Each structure stands twice: as C-alpha cells, then as structure tokens.
Image (spheres, rainbow, N blue to C red):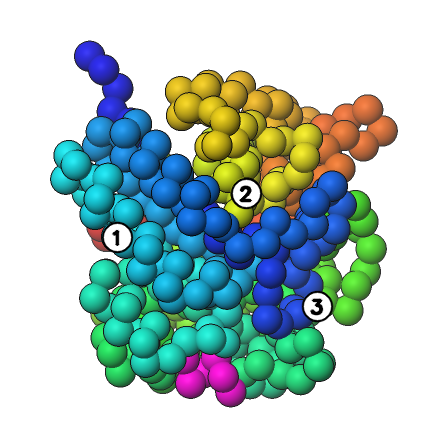
Amino acid sequence: MKKPHNLQLLIKPASSSCNIRCTYCFYYDICSIREEENYGIMTDNVLETLIRKSFAYADSQVSIVFQGGEPTLAGLNFFEKYINLVQKYNKNKLSVNHGIQTNGMTLNQEWAEFFKKHSFLVGVSIDGTKESHNTFRIDTKGDGTFDQVWASIKLLQKYQVDFNILTVINSATAVRAKEIYNFYKENDLRYQQYIPCLNPLENPNFNYPFTLTNDLYAKFLCELFDVWYRDVIRGNLIYVSNFENYLAMLLGIPPGTCGMTGHCTPHMVVEADGSFYPCDFYVLDEYKIGNIMEDDYAKIEQRLHSTKLLEESKPIAEPCKNCKYFKICRGGCRRHREPLIVDGSVNLNRFCKAYKQFFNYALPRLKYLGSKIL
C-alpha cells in the first residue's frame, strides 16, 4: 500500500530579515556563519513553484507554517498571493493547515482579519511581563518591544484569531515562572509554550547575559509545574506544551515536540531562495538538502531521510543508558548536546542536571495525572 505523503513545511519568506534585535536570537547567529546571511524576500516565482510542487506531491494533508526572521516582513500581499496559489494548485482538495510565528510588531487590523478569514494558527513570541520581555526582546534602537507586542495580542483576541504564546526561558524569565504563568492566565492566554534559550552554536558554553543555567532552568520548570499542576487538579486547564508532552509520553503517546524524541526527526525548512534544510536550528550550508527550483520532492525527501544530521543525533551518552529518567528524557534535543563529542565521548545534554532535578520533583505528580486519565 502506498504511504501517504503528508507535507509539513516551515517556510522563511523573509529569510533572516527582522524588525527587532533580540539579544539571544539563535537564527541571527546561524545566519552569520553561513555563506549567505540573508536571501531577502521570497520571489513570486519561488513561491509559486513551491506551492505547485507541494500540492502535486502531497496526497493527504499539507501543513505550512511561516517563520523567520520575521515572516510578516514579506508583506500582507505576499500572504494573499500564497492563499490564492494554494487554492489554485490544491486540485485534490487536500486538508491544509496554515500557521505563522511572529514577533507581533507589524500586526494590525488587516493582518488580524486575514488570519481569521483563512484560519491561521498564530504563534506570538512574548517573554512574560513587560519587565522580563524588555530585557532581551529589544528593537534596533535598543528599546523594549513589549507594548507593541501586547497591543497585537489584544488585537488577535478582539478578532478571535486562534493563537498561542511562545516564551523563551532565559536568565530574565527563568526567575519569574509563577509571575509569568499567572500573568498569562489572568489575560486568558491559555495556550503556552516555553523553550530554553540557546547559546550561539559556535560558543555553546560561554556565559552570556541571557544564558540559561541548569540551576535557573530547574527552578523555572519546578515553579511552573507547581502552578500548572494546581490548576489542573482544580479543573482549570491551561495548556503548557512542555508538561502536556511529558504526560503524553507517560501514556505511550509520541511527543509532539521533536526535541523530546531522543533523536532528530526530519523536517522540511524552506529558506526564501527555495533551499531546503532538515532542521530550523541547522539552516547551514553543510546541511542543505536541495532547492525547489532545481529538485523534485522525491529527491529532496530522499536526501532528508539520509542527512547526516539525523545519524549524528542517534548516539547515546554513557550516563544516559543507566539513568532512571532516560525513558522520558531520551537525551533531549541534539542542539542542546553541542558539541556532540567531548574528549572522544558522546556529550550529555547541557540541561541534564536541570532535567534530573525537575523529574525528581515532578514525575510522581505527572504519573498521578496519567493514572487519572487512564
């Protein structure tokens, strides 16, 4: 029986272009160490070729998420062309999911109406309260961006756009877990995702002002879990993807986050020039697997599943093999194990200590919740 081709694309229509300058931006770092830092705005030709080939190849479902840089810099007209092309080439009436991850700086009524009309799931990047957000999420003048982002969130709520919150756990947010969670809850932001801050790829162990240490990460996870668990027990369900994924894993359900699988899973990340890469953290020349202007999907997918990125992520560090938490930790995201080899041995996740503290603290209660679901 033919295996269905479900396409999941992460498209960067404005490449690395951005209208703010977050101190900890991992993509700014990635782009600075590749041959071409910025491919500019995706051309109409690349966009149409990408959509045409995508719907010619897919035969089940297509999920497309736009990211950056800041994807809205491609302009609303670009996204309207995208919708028209999907309608033109989706001849088999496949199910299509649209999404976008934005810093919220350019959103206005027209954007909100567009997202609502076309059922976009919008992810908004915000780092908690005004104080914590403005520490590192600053504009090109060095000023905080909270007020504009908050206005955009209120706009999305007004137009009833489906959206969630993405918060980076860094030195400023890690000490405010309870405060941030309650701030979101009080403002009806019930779908939350928290991701650990990344150090630059070429200097993973340096202590930057934004660096997330193991002690800070453990403190954040434990405090966040306490307030989330209290709400769950009381029947006030707030979706925190980190904990929802751990709960799913305890129930035998695969995690929805790549970094929790224990090894890299193939993704299709598309830069503005049509080039494909297997992971958003590794949009580097050495990991390029093709270009939609030159290659067909069969060739790109073949390269995707044989890329060295996947194989490099599979070795397990010796201490992990006997760790009582390995079945739920699985070694974590490959990006958090850079450099992969240290003194001839497979490296541990940089947050190993934090995860051990968290699981020791929270796992009994996670298991209790799992037993209630079963």
Main SS class of the magenta portion in the image: helix
Residue annotated with mark 1: 84
Quarter of the figure with residue 288? top right
Could you tell me residue 45's position as x and y percent?
43, 43
Name the amino acid, label 3.
Thr
Q: Amino acid at mark 1?
A: Asn
At a point 54% along the width and 73% down the height, the residue shown is 127
> Would you say residue 148 sits in the magenta stretch?
yes
Residue 61 sits in which quadrant? top left
Point out the residue furthest to the left here. Answer: 93
Residue reaching furthest top?
1
Quadrant of residue 286 in the image? top right
Task: Check disc 3: other Cα within 10 Å, few if <14, some if 14-19, many if 20+.
Answer: some
**Which disc number belongs to residue 273?**
2
Reading the image, the residue beneath label 3 is 23
Q: How many marks?
A: 3
Which residue reaches farthest front?
45
